[in-house]
Image (cartoon, grey):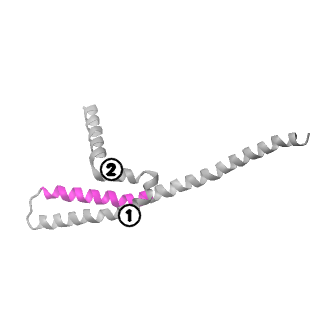
Amino acid sequence: MISLIWTLSAHTRYCLRRYMPTNRLLDAIRRRPNLRWGIPAMLLAVPYLLIASICTNALADGAPGWLHLVVLWAVWNAMKFTIMGPVSLILLVRARIAEAVARPGVRRDRDAGESLNHAAAEPLLHR
């Protein structure tokens, strides 16, 4: 029973990750070159909140109950985009710190290699 539930949840996650446009967009934003688009992507939450507001008003006026699902969907997507802004900012800072830490190490290794080559060449010059 547990393996069936596990398999079903794995297939559902795969389907949602692969075919839902918002998930694909968020996956693209999480890549290193696109992390800078996380804050502007927060603006995509506005249309979803507008949809949720319109559907909530329609429900208050007596619209069909299935609009509750649309409200849930819109609020969920709005939350995903709102949370992605700060998360992408944190990921960008972490990536830039890692790149800055790696950069001097490369210079240090290159300089050490040049000094070793220079030191190895010195005895040949003094002969």
Q: Secondary structure at mark 2?
A: helix
Q: Is residue 38 left or right of residue 100?
A: left
On residue 54, the disc is none
The residue depicted at 36 percent of the width and 59 percent of the height is 83
Q: How many marks?
A: 2
| Residue bearing mark 2 | 24
Q: Quadrant of residue 78?
A: bottom left
The residue depicted at 73 percent of the width and 44 percent of the height is 113
Percent from the top left, x then y, of residue 3? Answer: 28, 32
Q: Quadrant of the C terminus?
A: top right
Q: Secondary structure at mark 1?
A: helix
Q: Which residues are magenta?
A: 66-88
Label 1, label 2: how far apart the Cα atoms are: 16 Å
Q: Is residue 59 left or right of residue 73?
A: left
Sequence order check: which comes first, mark 1 or mark 2?
A: 2
Give the vertical position of 49 relative to 30 (above or below): below
| Residue closer to the observer: 115 or 67 | 115
| Residue closer to the observer: 126 or 4 | 126
Percent from the top left, x then y, of residue 103? Answer: 62, 52
- Amino acid type, residue under disc 1 in the picture: Pro
Confirm or deny contact between disc 1 and disc 2 (CB under 8 A): no
Percent from the top left, x then y, of residue 7? Answer: 28, 34
On residue 40, the disc is 1
Percent from the top left, x then y, of residue 123? Answer: 87, 40
Q: Quadrant of residue 11?
A: top left
The residue depicted at 9 percent of the width and 68 percent of the height is 61
The residue depicted at 81 percent of the width and 40 percent of the height is 120
- Amino acid type, residue under disc 2 in the picture: Arg
